[in-house]
Image (cartoon, helix red, strand yellow):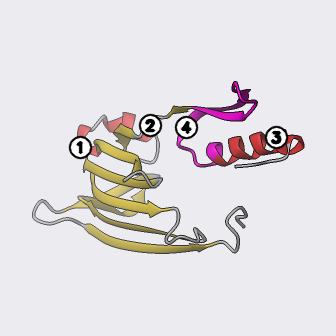
Amino acid sequence: DRIAIVEKDTLAVRCKQQLANLSLFNSVRVSFNTDSVNNILLNIIVVERWYTWPLPIFQIADRNFNQWWLTKDPERLNYGVEFTQYNMRGRNETMRIKLQDGFTRKFEVAYTLPWVGKSQTVGASFKTSYLQNREIWYATNNNKLLYYRDANKPMLERYTAMFTLKFRKHLYKTS
């Protein structure tokens, strides 16, 4: 490409911003060199970030730690794993899968496409989840919650699905 020499620094800053805004790299460095024929070469050096993140889940299901500490009931804990895969298929898409067991059983899948089509002005995301609780609280007595549990069936089941469509008027502007 041919650019004016006075635009060189502006081009380097914009190039660095565009690459950094993708959230695909830990660091971006843009520099210029000249070759033997006095051509200016644009050098872009990036350090990619990790794309696969397995995160453990360990949560207390009670209102706070002090409430759980009164009973120290291991059945009132949530545990599992959440997998996040960034840059799926090399298009900056993100997929999350959450598998949780314990007091609250949960299965969740989310998928995000930052843009759809060549104009890159439309993005979409989808999320679905299933949640199941083994007991519910129904009243308080002397400032303590009273719970009901049925060993044969879950007390609460919830299915959710969400679809989001994101639109931006211009490629470099998001509102």
Q: How many angstroms separate mark 4 from mark 1 (CA)?
A: 41 Å
Q: Is residue 142 visible?
A: no
Label 4 vs 1, first from the N-terminus: 4
Crowd around label 4: few <14 · some 14–19 · many ≥20 (10 Å): some
* Front position in the image: 84 or 141: 84
Crowd around label 2: few <14 · some 14–19 · many ≥20 (10 Å): few
Q: Secondary structure at mark 1?
A: helix
Q: Secondary structure at mark 4?
A: strand
Q: Nearer the viewer, mark 1 or mark 3?
A: 3
Q: Nearer the viewer, mark 2 or mark 3?
A: 3
Task: Give the residue type that dot 1 points to.
Answer: Glu
Crowd around label 3: few <14 · some 14–19 · many ≥20 (10 Å): some
Q: Which residues are magenta?
A: 19-45
- At 39% across and 61% down in the image, what residue appears? 111
Q: Secondary structure at mark 2?
A: helix
* Front position in the image: 63 or 51: 51
The residue to which callout 2 is attached is 65
Crowd around label 1: few <14 · some 14–19 · many ≥20 (10 Å): few
